[in-house]
Image: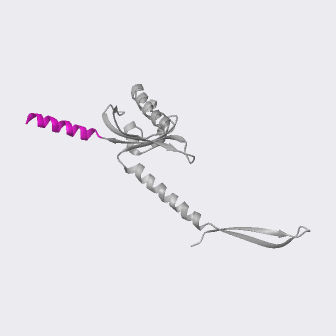
C-alpha cells in the first residue's frame, strides 16, 4: 500500500491562458508508518497510565501536574485526571508534605539527575498513611533542556506492614 500526496498545478501560457497541467506526487508511505508507530506508542502509554498500580505523574518545572494516571487520581481523591492538570501539590497535600515533594522535585530539575528509591510517608485524601518508594526522572525537550519531571511511586505500605508483623512474630519465638 502506498500513501501519496498529489499537487496538481495548472500551466499558463505567456498570455495567461491555461495550456496544460502538471501533477507532482509525493510518496508519504514512510511518514504513514511513522504515524502508525506514534499511534501505537500512544496506545501503549495510555495502557500503562490506565492500568499500572504504581502512581505515575508528570509535572512541569513550576510543579504543575501535566499528566497523571488513575492510581494517582485515587490517591489525590479526585474523579478525573483533568481535575489535577495545572495544579500543584499544595492543592492536594498539607503544606509540609507539599514543600517536601517540591524540594525533591526541584533537586531533580536543578541537577538534571534522576533520584532513585526515595522512601517517604504521606497521607491520602482520606487520611490513610502510605509509604511510597519513589523514582524521579528529569524530562527533557528535543534540545535536551529540562522541562519537567516524571515520577513513579510504588506503594510499599503492605510490604512494610508484613515485615513488621514478621519481626514481631520472630520476637515472640
Give the dominant element type of the magenta stretch: helix, strand or loop: helix
Tell me the quarter of the picture where residue 32 sits.
Answer: bottom right
Q: Residue at x 69, y 70 (%)?
A: 25
Residue 170 in percent (x, y) is at 12, 37
Work out whether 149 lies above or below 102.
below
Q: Nearer the viewer, residue 112 or 84?
A: 112
Side of 54 relative to 160 (left or right):
right
Could you say where residue 117 lies in the image, as x and y percent from the top left? 35, 40
Residue 124 image offset from top left, x and y in percent: 35, 34
Image quarter (top left, top right, bottom left or bottom right) of the C terminus: top left
Q: Quadrant of the N terminus?
A: bottom right
Magenta segment includes 160:
yes
Residue 45 relative to residue 164: left or right: right
User: Please, is residue 60 above or below residue 103 in the view?
Assistant: below
Question: Going 44% across and 52% down the picture, which residue do you hit?
Answer: 46
89 in relation to 138, above or below: above
Please provide the residue range marked out in magenta: 156-173
Taking the spot 55% from the left edge, 42% from the top edge, the residue there is 145
Across and down, in percent, residue 7 comes to 72, 67
Q: Residue furthest top?
A: 95
Q: Is residue 87 left or right of residue 51?
A: right
Q: Residue at x 34, y 42 (%)?
A: 154
Amino acid at each position: 500500500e502506498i500513501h501519496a500526496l498529489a499537487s496538481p498545478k495548472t500551466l499558463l501560457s505567456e498570455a495567461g491562458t491555461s495550456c496544460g497541467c502538471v501533477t507532482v506526487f509525493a510518496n508519504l508511505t514512510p511518514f504513514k508508518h511513522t504515524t502508525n508507530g506514534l499511534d501505537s506508542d500512544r496506545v501503549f502509554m495510555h495502557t500503562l497510565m490506565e492500568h499500572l498500580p504504581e502512581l505515575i505523574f508528570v509535572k512541569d518545572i513550576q510543579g504543575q501536574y501535566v499528566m497523571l494516571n488513575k492510581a494517582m487520581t485515587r490517591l489525590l481523591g479526585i474523579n478525573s485526571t483533568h481535575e489535577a492538570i495545572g495544579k500543584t501539590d499544595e492543592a492536594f497535600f498539607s503544606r509540609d508534605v507539599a514543600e517536601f515533594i517540591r524540594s525533591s522535585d526541584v533537586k531533580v530539575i536543578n541537577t538534571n539527575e534522576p533520584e532513585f528509591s526515595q522512601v517517604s510517608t504521606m497521607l491520602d485524601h482520606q487520611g490513610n498513611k502510605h509509604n511510597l518508594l519513589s523514582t524521579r526522572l528529569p524530562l527533557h525537550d528535543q534540545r535536551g533542556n529540562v522541562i519537567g519531571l516524571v515520577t513513579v511511586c510504588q506503594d510499599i505500605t503492605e510490604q512494610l506492614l508484613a515485615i513488621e508483623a514478621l519481626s514481631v512474630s520472630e520476637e515472640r519465638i
